[in-house]
Image: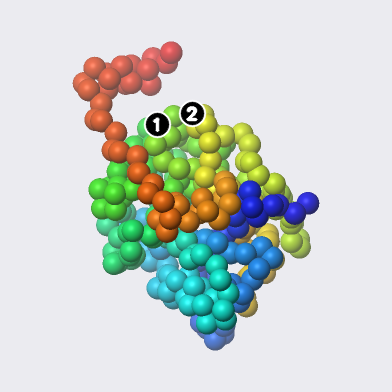
Amino acid sequence: MMINEQDYAFGLDTERYSSSPELGKWMDWKAVAMHTNPTVTFVVTRAGISWGYQDPLFAFNWKGIRDIDVWRLSEGIDLPPVGRGAYHVIYPGENPITQVDNFFRIVGDADWEHDRLVIDLELHHNQTRRTITNCTKTFAYKCYERTGRYPLLYARSLWLNQYTYPEELTFMDLWLAQYRRATVGYTPEYEPPPNPLPNGFSTWLVHQTADRGKPIGSPVKKVMDYNRWNGGIEKVMRYFGFTGNEIPVPLPTPLTLEERVARLEKEVFGG
């Protein structure tokens, strides 16, 4: 069953493995621009991991996403701008401040009026729920301080419920991974909405609907991730700041001493 693009706009996420410099094969961003079934409306690429790793092809992919608009203009294709984002994989046992510093070092002088950030949260490294939750919150707060916006939170529902206190992360927009499993070949997209939502969340923004989609633009990948927005292209454009006047959620008020004590008692004694 085909997913209606009017209800769920289509997007991709990429990393270094979409190209192979060793073989002289590079992600073809013109092919992405020309792809119309479905039309690519947003692309998010990996920036780095933890406090020291940088995706070696981030700069190439970052420019390539922006070049989608250039290719479409040159071919006379009348489409709105493509939303561009960067994601960073968190190590929950490491200092979140140094991880944020690494993220912003990599993305450099991004256009914060339009470019958006994403936390990739899928590694627990045997840390406690409190440690993982606090690391994620601190990372998100620091992104807000530098850009005026919270990052998107990429994760799985069951993972969030098991390894975090998801009720404390609802200030971020949610990008959920839920797709069909297969061992070989391509798999059809998991039709939105993702279900169930993590504890405390009432909605979602992006759904990763496939991890074995047919590659678009990549000469080396055998399969590719597919994603759907919770809404049509007009909602994508609004989120990336190309239309409307979206007001970001403000920073939360710090907990009082009484609230901190109550939370600690709940974690220690339950209830």
Instruction: Work out whether 99 lies above or below 20.
Output: above
Mark 2–mark 1 distance (CA, rounded to whole Å): 8 Å
The residue to which callout 2 is attached is: 200
* Residue 114 left/right relative to 211: left
Residue 223 can be seen, yes or no:
no
The crowding category of the residue bearing disc 2, from other C-alpha atoms within 10 Å (few below 14, some 14 to 19, many at least 20), is few
Q: Nearer the viewer, residue 23 or 40?
A: 40
Is mark 2 in CB contact (under 8 Å) with mark 1?
Answer: yes
* Residue 124 left/right relative to 256: right
- Amino acid type assigned to the residue bearing label 1 in the image: Glu
Q: Quadrant of the C terminus?
A: top left
Residue 167 can be seen, yes or no:
yes
- Residue at 33 percent of width and 65 percent of height: 110
Q: Earlier in the sequence, mark 2 or mark 1?
A: 1
- Amino acid type assigned to the residue bearing label 2 in the image: Gly
Q: Position of residue 145 (x, y in %)?
A: 25, 48
Q: Nearer the viewer, residue 141 or 112?
A: 112
Residue farthest toward the bottom in the current orientation of the protein = 24
The crowding category of the residue bearing disc 1, from other C-alpha atoms within 10 Å (few below 14, some 14 to 19, many at least 20), is some
User: Which quadrant of the structure image shows residue 258?
Assistant: top left
Instruction: Work out whether 256 lies above or below 42.
Output: above
Identify the element where label 1 is drawn. Answer: helix
Identify the element where label 2 is drawn. Answer: loop
* Residue 176 left/right relative to 256: right
Q: Position of residue 215 (x, y in %)?
A: 65, 68
The residue to which callout 1 is attached is: 168
Q: Nearer the viewer, residue 252 or 54?
A: 252
- Residue at 66 percent of width and 68 percent of height: 36
Q: Position of residue 160 (x, y in %)?
A: 50, 37
Residue 258, labelled with which disc? none
